[in-house]
Image (spheres, rainbow, N blue to C red):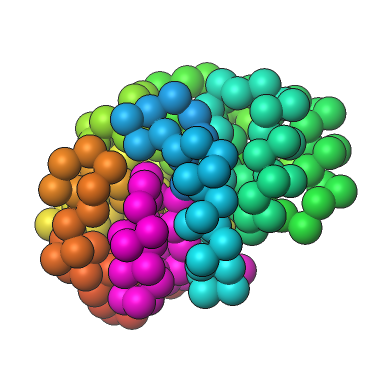
Amino acid sequence: MIAPGFVKICGVTSLDDAQFVVAVGASALGLILAESSRQLTLDQARVIADATKGDLLRFAVFRHNDDDFILEHVDALGIDVVQVHGALSASLLAELRERPVLIVKALSVDEPELLSFDDASVDAVLIDGSKPGSGESYPREHLERREFSVPVIAAGGLTPLNVADLIAESGVVGVDTSSGVESHPGVKSHDLVVDFIRNARAAFAARKD
Protein backbone atom coordinates (compact mmCIF):
# COMPACT_ATOMS: atom_id res chain seq x y z
CA MET A 1 0.00 0.00 0.00
CA ILE A 2 3.07 2.24 0.20
CA ALA A 3 4.43 2.06 -3.33
CA PRO A 4 6.25 4.37 -5.77
CA GLY A 5 4.22 7.54 -6.24
CA PHE A 6 3.20 7.73 -2.59
CA VAL A 7 2.54 11.33 -1.43
CA LYS A 8 1.63 12.17 2.16
CA ILE A 9 0.42 15.52 3.46
CA CYS A 10 1.17 15.58 7.17
CA GLY A 11 0.13 17.90 10.00
CA VAL A 12 -3.47 18.22 8.82
CA THR A 13 -5.42 20.02 11.54
CA SER A 14 -8.84 20.82 10.06
CA LEU A 15 -11.62 18.94 8.36
CA ASP A 16 -11.57 21.42 5.48
CA ASP A 17 -7.90 20.78 4.79
CA ALA A 18 -8.39 17.03 5.16
CA GLN A 19 -11.20 16.97 2.63
CA PHE A 20 -9.14 19.05 0.22
CA VAL A 21 -6.18 16.69 0.56
CA VAL A 22 -8.50 13.82 -0.33
CA ALA A 23 -10.04 15.71 -3.26
CA VAL A 24 -6.69 16.46 -4.91
CA GLY A 25 -5.52 12.88 -4.73
CA ALA A 26 -2.96 12.57 -1.95
CA SER A 27 -2.05 9.03 -0.95
CA ALA A 28 -2.19 9.78 2.76
CA LEU A 29 -2.64 12.41 5.42
CA GLY A 30 -0.98 12.65 8.80
CA LEU A 31 -2.66 13.44 12.12
CA ILE A 32 -0.12 14.51 14.73
CA LEU A 33 -0.84 13.32 18.26
CA ALA A 34 2.60 14.22 19.62
CA GLU A 35 3.58 17.58 21.08
CA SER A 36 3.67 19.99 18.16
CA SER A 37 2.17 23.23 16.87
CA ARG A 38 0.02 20.88 14.77
CA GLN A 39 -0.96 18.57 17.64
CA LEU A 40 -4.58 17.37 17.68
CA THR A 41 -6.69 16.26 20.59
CA LEU A 42 -8.21 12.81 20.34
CA ASP A 43 -11.60 14.31 19.53
CA GLN A 44 -10.19 16.57 16.81
CA ALA A 45 -8.31 13.68 15.24
CA ARG A 46 -11.37 11.44 15.37
CA VAL A 47 -13.45 13.92 13.37
CA ILE A 48 -10.87 13.95 10.56
CA ALA A 49 -10.19 10.21 10.71
CA ASP A 50 -13.89 9.34 10.53
CA ALA A 51 -14.58 11.76 7.66
CA THR A 52 -11.73 10.42 5.50
CA LYS A 53 -12.03 6.70 6.20
CA GLY A 54 -11.59 4.71 3.02
CA ASP A 55 -10.47 7.72 0.97
CA LEU A 56 -6.71 7.50 1.61
CA LEU A 57 -4.29 6.18 4.21
CA ARG A 58 -4.73 7.94 7.55
CA PHE A 59 -1.53 8.14 9.60
CA ALA A 60 -1.44 8.72 13.35
CA VAL A 61 1.92 10.32 14.15
CA PHE A 62 3.57 9.85 17.54
CA ARG A 63 6.86 11.11 18.94
CA HIS A 64 8.22 10.07 22.32
CA ASN A 65 4.75 9.01 23.49
CA ASP A 66 4.44 6.05 25.82
CA ASP A 67 3.04 2.75 24.60
CA ASP A 68 -0.29 3.05 26.41
CA PHE A 69 -0.91 6.49 24.88
CA ILE A 70 -0.17 5.18 21.40
CA LEU A 71 -2.38 2.11 21.73
CA GLU A 72 -5.24 4.11 23.24
CA HIS A 73 -5.22 6.54 20.31
CA VAL A 74 -4.81 3.84 17.67
CA ASP A 75 -7.80 1.96 19.04
CA ALA A 76 -9.93 5.07 19.43
CA LEU A 77 -9.21 6.41 15.95
CA GLY A 78 -9.27 3.24 13.89
CA ILE A 79 -6.54 4.67 11.68
CA ASP A 80 -4.62 2.84 8.96
CA VAL A 81 -0.97 3.58 9.73
CA VAL A 82 1.01 4.22 12.91
CA GLN A 83 4.10 6.43 12.48
CA VAL A 84 6.47 6.36 15.43
CA HIS A 85 9.32 8.80 16.07
CA GLY A 86 11.54 7.72 18.94
CA ALA A 87 11.62 4.39 20.73
CA LEU A 88 9.60 1.54 19.26
CA SER A 89 9.63 -1.21 21.84
CA ALA A 90 9.23 -4.90 21.11
CA SER A 91 6.09 -4.97 23.24
CA LEU A 92 4.53 -2.08 21.32
CA LEU A 93 5.39 -3.75 18.02
CA ALA A 94 3.73 -6.94 19.18
CA GLU A 95 0.61 -5.07 20.28
CA LEU A 96 0.39 -3.16 17.00
CA ARG A 97 0.78 -6.37 14.99
CA GLU A 98 -2.44 -7.59 16.59
CA ARG A 99 -4.24 -4.63 15.02
CA PRO A 100 -5.06 -3.99 11.33
CA VAL A 101 -2.50 -1.20 10.90
CA LEU A 102 0.71 -0.62 9.02
CA ILE A 103 3.75 0.44 11.05
CA VAL A 104 6.14 3.14 9.84
CA LYS A 105 9.27 3.93 11.82
CA ALA A 106 10.59 7.46 11.52
CA LEU A 107 14.38 7.74 11.58
CA SER A 108 16.30 10.99 12.00
CA VAL A 109 19.33 11.50 9.80
CA ASP A 110 21.60 12.51 12.68
CA GLU A 111 20.76 9.61 15.00
CA PRO A 112 22.74 6.34 15.14
CA GLU A 113 19.43 4.50 14.88
CA LEU A 114 19.35 5.34 11.16
CA LEU A 115 22.08 2.77 10.62
CA SER A 116 21.19 0.27 13.34
CA PHE A 117 17.39 -0.03 13.15
CA ASP A 118 16.07 -3.43 12.06
CA ASP A 119 13.67 -2.41 9.33
CA ALA A 120 12.37 -5.95 8.91
CA SER A 121 10.14 -5.30 11.92
CA VAL A 122 8.10 -2.55 10.20
CA ASP A 123 6.24 -1.94 6.93
CA ALA A 124 8.15 1.19 5.86
CA VAL A 125 10.62 3.75 7.17
CA LEU A 126 10.41 7.53 6.99
CA ILE A 127 13.69 9.43 6.87
CA ASP A 128 13.34 12.82 8.54
CA GLY A 129 15.57 15.67 9.65
CA SER A 130 16.77 16.29 13.19
CA LYS A 131 13.73 18.45 13.99
CA PRO A 132 10.58 16.87 12.52
CA GLY A 133 8.00 19.45 11.48
CA SER A 134 10.50 22.31 11.41
CA GLY A 135 10.77 22.52 7.65
CA GLU A 136 14.54 22.08 7.87
CA SER A 137 16.13 20.05 5.10
CA TYR A 138 19.25 17.89 5.22
CA PRO A 139 21.90 16.72 2.73
CA ARG A 140 20.15 14.19 0.54
CA GLU A 141 23.12 11.81 0.59
CA HIS A 142 21.81 10.78 4.01
CA LEU A 143 19.15 8.84 2.11
CA GLU A 144 21.90 6.67 0.62
CA ARG A 145 23.75 5.85 3.85
CA ARG A 146 22.22 2.39 4.01
CA GLU A 147 19.87 0.14 2.11
CA PHE A 148 16.47 -0.78 3.47
CA SER A 149 14.38 -3.88 2.84
CA VAL A 150 11.12 -1.94 3.13
CA PRO A 151 9.77 1.14 1.31
CA VAL A 152 11.46 4.45 2.16
CA ILE A 153 9.53 7.72 2.51
CA ALA A 154 11.52 10.96 2.48
CA ALA A 155 10.51 13.87 4.72
CA GLY A 156 12.17 17.00 6.03
CA GLY A 157 12.11 20.37 4.29
CA LEU A 158 10.25 19.21 1.18
CA THR A 159 8.32 21.82 -0.79
CA PRO A 160 6.77 22.03 -4.25
CA LEU A 161 10.06 23.55 -5.44
CA ASN A 162 12.44 20.79 -4.36
CA VAL A 163 10.39 17.59 -4.24
CA ALA A 164 10.93 16.68 -7.90
CA ASP A 165 14.73 16.90 -7.57
CA LEU A 166 14.65 14.72 -4.45
CA ILE A 167 12.63 12.05 -6.24
CA ALA A 168 14.82 12.17 -9.34
CA GLU A 169 18.02 11.86 -7.32
CA SER A 170 16.98 9.06 -4.94
CA GLY A 171 15.23 5.74 -4.84
CA VAL A 172 12.55 6.69 -2.33
CA VAL A 173 9.05 5.35 -2.98
CA GLY A 174 7.28 8.20 -1.23
CA VAL A 175 7.50 11.78 -0.01
CA ASP A 176 6.01 13.56 2.97
CA THR A 177 5.51 17.26 3.64
CA SER A 178 3.88 19.39 6.33
CA SER A 179 5.28 22.89 6.75
CA GLY A 180 6.30 22.94 3.09
CA VAL A 181 2.66 23.31 2.03
CA GLU A 182 1.42 25.65 4.76
CA SER A 183 0.35 29.27 4.81
CA HIS A 184 1.15 29.24 8.54
CA PRO A 185 1.65 26.42 11.07
CA GLY A 186 -1.24 23.98 10.97
CA VAL A 187 -3.02 25.65 8.04
CA LYS A 188 -2.46 24.21 4.58
CA SER A 189 -2.15 26.37 1.49
CA HIS A 190 -4.37 24.59 -1.01
CA ASP A 191 -2.34 25.96 -3.90
CA LEU A 192 0.88 24.59 -2.42
CA VAL A 193 -0.72 21.21 -1.74
CA VAL A 194 -1.80 20.97 -5.37
CA ASP A 195 1.65 22.00 -6.62
CA PHE A 196 3.41 19.53 -4.31
CA ILE A 197 1.30 16.57 -5.35
CA ARG A 198 1.50 17.45 -9.06
CA ASN A 199 5.28 17.92 -9.01
CA ALA A 200 5.87 14.77 -6.98
CA ARG A 201 3.70 12.58 -9.19
CA ALA A 202 5.29 13.94 -12.36
CA ALA A 203 8.75 13.21 -10.97
CA PHE A 204 7.81 9.67 -9.98
CA ALA A 205 6.34 9.09 -13.46
CA ALA A 206 9.52 10.35 -15.13
CA ARG A 207 11.89 8.31 -12.99
CA LYS A 208 13.11 4.98 -14.34
CA ASP A 209 13.60 2.74 -11.29
Nearest to the observer: residue 59 or residue 163: 59
| Left or right for 145, reference 149 | left
Image quadrant containing the C terminus: bottom left
Report if residue 13 lies within the magenta region. Answer: yes
Q: Is residue 12 visible?
A: yes
Q: Is residue 125 visible?
A: no
Task: Name the quadrant containing residue 70.
Answer: top right
Task: Name the quadrant containing residue 201.
Answer: bottom left
At which x and y percent is residue 5?
42, 71
| Left or right for 54, reference 121 | left
| Left or right for 185, reference 48 | left
**At x 52% / y 74%, what residue is drawn?**
55
At which x and y percent is residue 104?
60, 46
Q: Is residue 11 above or below residue 130?
A: below
All told, the count of numbered labels is 0
Image quadrant containing the N terminus: bottom right
Nearest to the observer: residue 55 or residue 63: 55
**At x 72% / y 26%, what residue is drawn?**
67
At which x and y percent is residue 177?
32, 50
Q: Is residue 55 above or below residue 139?
A: below
| Left or right for 177, reference 151 | left
**At x 44% / y 29%, what residue is drawn?**
108
**At x 51% / y 55%, what residue is drawn?**
47
At which x and y percent is residue 207?
33, 73
Which range is magenta?
Answer: 1-30
